[in-house]
Image (tube, helix red, strand yellow):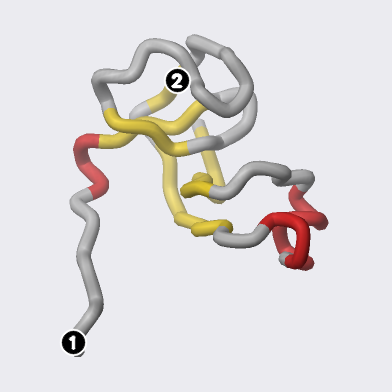
Amino acid sequence: MAGRRRIPLSGYKACRNCKFIVPSDVTKCPNCGSSDFSDDWSGLIIILDPQNSQIAQKLGITKEGMYAIRVR
């Protein structure tokens, strides 16, 4: 499909505190400030408009970005 862009997820890790997904070279979560990350995560939610997203509200997400569904 035109317009689809694949993101290689092997170079990313998830914050254990807020599940925000960041590149592997980041040392501090830009969302919550934690430095506790995991490479063992699964599922992906992309939030574009947290104020109008029912899913974001249900999950307590207030900042747009990529979030893991499960972080181990």
The residue nearer to you, when weighing 40 against 23, is: 23
Is the residue 11 above or below the residue 26 in the image? below
Judge left or right: residue 11 versus residue 69: left
Judge left or right: residue 51 versus residue 37: right
Residue that carries the numbered disc 1 in the rendered image = 2
Residue that carries the numbered disc 2 in the rendered image = 37
Per the rendering, the mark at residue 52 is none
Amino acid type, mark 2? Phe
Instruction: Locate residue 17: give its quadrant.
Output: top right
Judge left or right: residue 61 versus residue 31: right
Callout 1: SS: loop
Judge left or right: residue 62 versus residue 65: right
Amino acid type, mark 1? Ala
Q: Residue at x 57, y 57 (%)?
A: 47
* Separation of marks 2 and 1 at Cα, in angstroms: 34 Å
The residue nearer to you, when weighing 55 against 38, is: 55
Q: Residue at x 78, y 67 (%)?
A: 54
How crowded is the residue under tag 2: few (<14 C-alpha within 10 Å), some, or many (20+)?
many
- Foreground mark, 2 or 1, reads 1
Q: Earlier in the sequence, mark 2 or mark 1?
A: 1
Q: Position of residue 51 (x, y in %)?
A: 76, 57
Q: Position of residue 26 (x, y in %)?
A: 33, 19
Callout 2: SS: strand
Is the residue 63 above or below the residue 34 in the image? below
Instruction: Locate residue 1: give its quadrant.
Output: bottom left
Is the residue 6 above or below the residue 29 in the image? below
